[in-house]
């Protein structure tokens, strides 16, 4: 027995010394080199494959463009999954960027929300023990053997506390921090290389987008921060009885393990389930959009990842929000600019829309504003002169995409997750309500919010939006539209 103990101690000492040994350092550098080569080879080979395929050098020359794009998108999704968590997460973000990618790519990358492989139970339970100081069977009355959900950064187990409540236990993927840090280092070098050749991929601040992704993903990796975000969200909606946020059990949580109330409900896209339960999908959809209007224009704090896996409809009809790792913040100045853009859209004010694009830094002030205004006027007039209810964010981005290569248009990094949230929200809404229109649902909330006494800040922002961007003078047509809205609301309530 003594020999066995000495052997174990000797092996442990050898392993401890090996971690900091020159040989271990060489091994780490070799692994890093192979990882970098794998990333570069995977992305470069995919780009080459797409180029050769569109040149007709890989056969299938008669294949339609849409079918070819679909095949490319499937190939990209499969490669992102093989590259691991960093690229799965990036793929999920790109899956809502219709302004960057064809719709076939958007559709396929959206599947990354649900098609993420789980990691072994042994590793998950080892992380729980190392983070919370006890084995899972000592912490919980019972815990499931298999995860009930797997995501890019972690996976969730169903369990019951010894005190009785049923909970969801979210466990972070092993070695996640070092994996993401290294992958982003490689991607930044690729992005800086692309910046030296702007004609290859124009229209986006790739380094800025990676920096924003880095900031948000590290916030999402901190489960204690996620718990605090959930509690802030719950406080913001404390006066909304139809909105629910799961309770956080802090004594069973850490930076890599988060234990929260388990919610048994329906996905917001389960229309048949909602109808069978006597719940109107249209009503739930309107509630969901109204919560986002409040988040964006009132709270300045929003859930940035509203895909169906992060939303549940409870049996009593309440809407539950999950997963607050990815949240966004909106400054008062940006809120004011968003209100301004909203009024310009309502007024069909093409000049105002162009000025909004400049003030929001989508368009350089040095651009040929006169010719650009004509292009925007044509696009928006064709859309807005039909019916406002027929305007969809995603369709507008499709129409605007071709002019990205003609004018100095960029997508500011700070809008990456706001656009992600809005487009994801719109996509879910079209499933829940085929006749959905963001403006139709949001306008009644905006009108009622304007008249509430606690909305002094927004009223001030609206008054600023009523001024002409260039001259600063009040535009009486906009004041008249606002007065009509308030008048109509007054009589609706009466």
Image: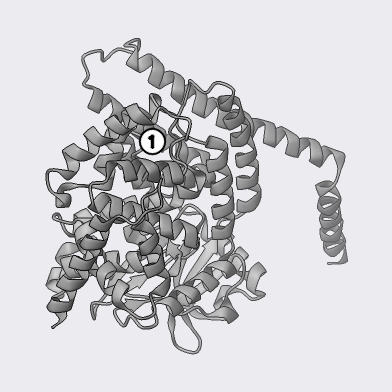
Image-based side of 371 in relation to 382, left or right: right
Q: Residue at x 63, y 31 (%)?
A: 189
Q: Nearer the viewer, residue 145 or 274?
A: 274
In the rendered image, the residue lying farthest to the bottom is 163
Mark 1 lies on a secondary structure that is loop
Residue 464 at least partly seen: yes
Q: Position of residue 164 (x, y in %)?
A: 45, 88
Q: How many marks?
A: 1
Residue 71 position by quadrant: top left
Residue 144 at least partly seen: no
Q: Position of residue 380 (x, y in %)?
A: 23, 39
Is residue 360 shown above or below 47? below
Q: Residue at x 43, y 46 (%)?
A: 93
Image-based side of 235 in relation to 349, left or right: right
Q: Residue at x 43, y 76 (%)?
A: 236
Q: Position of residue 254 (x, y in %)?
A: 61, 71
Residue 148 position by quadrant: bottom left
Circle 1 crowding by C-alpha within 10 Å: few under 14, some 14–19, many from 20: some
In the rendered image, the residue lying farthest to the top is 57
Residue 182 position by quadrant: top right
Quadrant containing the N terminus is bottom right
Is residue 461 shown above or below 178? below
Q: Position of residue 369 (x, y in %)?
A: 38, 31
Q: Which color scheme did the rendering employ for the protein?
A: one colour
Quadrant containing the C terminus is bottom left
Q: Residue at x 74, y 35 (%)?
A: 29
Which residue position holds label 1?
Answer: 100
């Amino acid at each position: 027995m003594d020999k066995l103990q000495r052997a174990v101690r000797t092996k442990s000492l050898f392993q401890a010394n090996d971690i900091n040994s020159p040989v271990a350092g060489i091994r780490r550098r070799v692994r890093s080199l192979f990882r970098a080569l794998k990333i570069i080879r995977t992305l470069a080979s995919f780009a080459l494959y797409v180029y050769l395929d569109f040149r007709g050098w890989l056969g299938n020359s008669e294949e339609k463009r849409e079918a070819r794009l679909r095949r490319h998108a499937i190939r990209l999704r499969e490669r992102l999954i093989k590259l691991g968590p960093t690229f799965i997460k990036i793929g999920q973000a790109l899956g809502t960027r219709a302004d960057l990618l064809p719709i076939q790519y958007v559709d396929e990358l959206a599947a990354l929300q649900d098609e993420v492989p789980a990691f072994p139970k042994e590793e998950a339970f080892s992380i729980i023990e190392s983070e919370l100081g006890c084995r899972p069977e000592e912490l919980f009355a019972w815990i499931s053997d298999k995860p009930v959900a797997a995501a890019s950064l972690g996976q969730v187990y169903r369990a019951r506390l010894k005190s009785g409540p049923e909970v969801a236990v979210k466990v972070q993927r092993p070695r996640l921090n070092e994996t993401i840090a290294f992958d982003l280092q490689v991607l930044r070098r690729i992005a800086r290389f692309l910046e030296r050749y702007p004609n290859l991929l124009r229209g986006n601040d790739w380094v800025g987008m990676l920096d924003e992704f880095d900031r948000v993903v590290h916030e999402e990796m901190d489960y204690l921060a996620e718990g605090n975000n959930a509690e802030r969200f719950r406080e913001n909606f404390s006066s909304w009885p139809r909105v629910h946020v799961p309770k956080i059990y802090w004594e069973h949580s850490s930076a890599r393990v988060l234990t929260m109330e388990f919610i048994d409900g329906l996905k917001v896209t389960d229309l048949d389930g909602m109808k069978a339960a006597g719940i109107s999908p249209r009503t739930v959809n309107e509630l969901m959009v109204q919560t986002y209007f409040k988040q964006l224009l009132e709270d300045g704090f929003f859930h940035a990842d509203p895909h169906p896996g992060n939303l549940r409809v409870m049996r009593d009809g309440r809407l539950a929000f999950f997963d607050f790792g990815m949240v966004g913040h909106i400054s008062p100045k940006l809120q004011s600019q968003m209100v301004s853009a909203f009024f310009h859209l309502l007024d069909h004010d093409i000049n105002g829309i162009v000025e909004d694009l400049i003030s929001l830094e989508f368009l350089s002030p040095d651009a040929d504003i006169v010719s650009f205004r004509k292009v925007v006027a044509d696009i928006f007039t064709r859309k807005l002169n039909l019916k406002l209810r027929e305007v969809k964010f995603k369709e507008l981005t499709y129409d605007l995409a071709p002019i990205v290569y003609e004018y100095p248009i960029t997508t500011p990094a700070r809008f990456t997750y706001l656009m992600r949230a809005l487009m994801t929200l719109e996509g879910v809404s079209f499933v829940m309500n085929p006749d959905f229109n963001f403006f139709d649902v949001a306008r009644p909330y905006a009108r009622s919010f304007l008249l509430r006494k606690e909305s002094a800040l927004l009223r001030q922002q609206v008054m600023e939006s009523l001024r002409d961007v260039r001259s600063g003078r009040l535009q009486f047509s906009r004041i008249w539209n606002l007065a009509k809205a308030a008048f109509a609301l007054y009589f609706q309530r009466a």
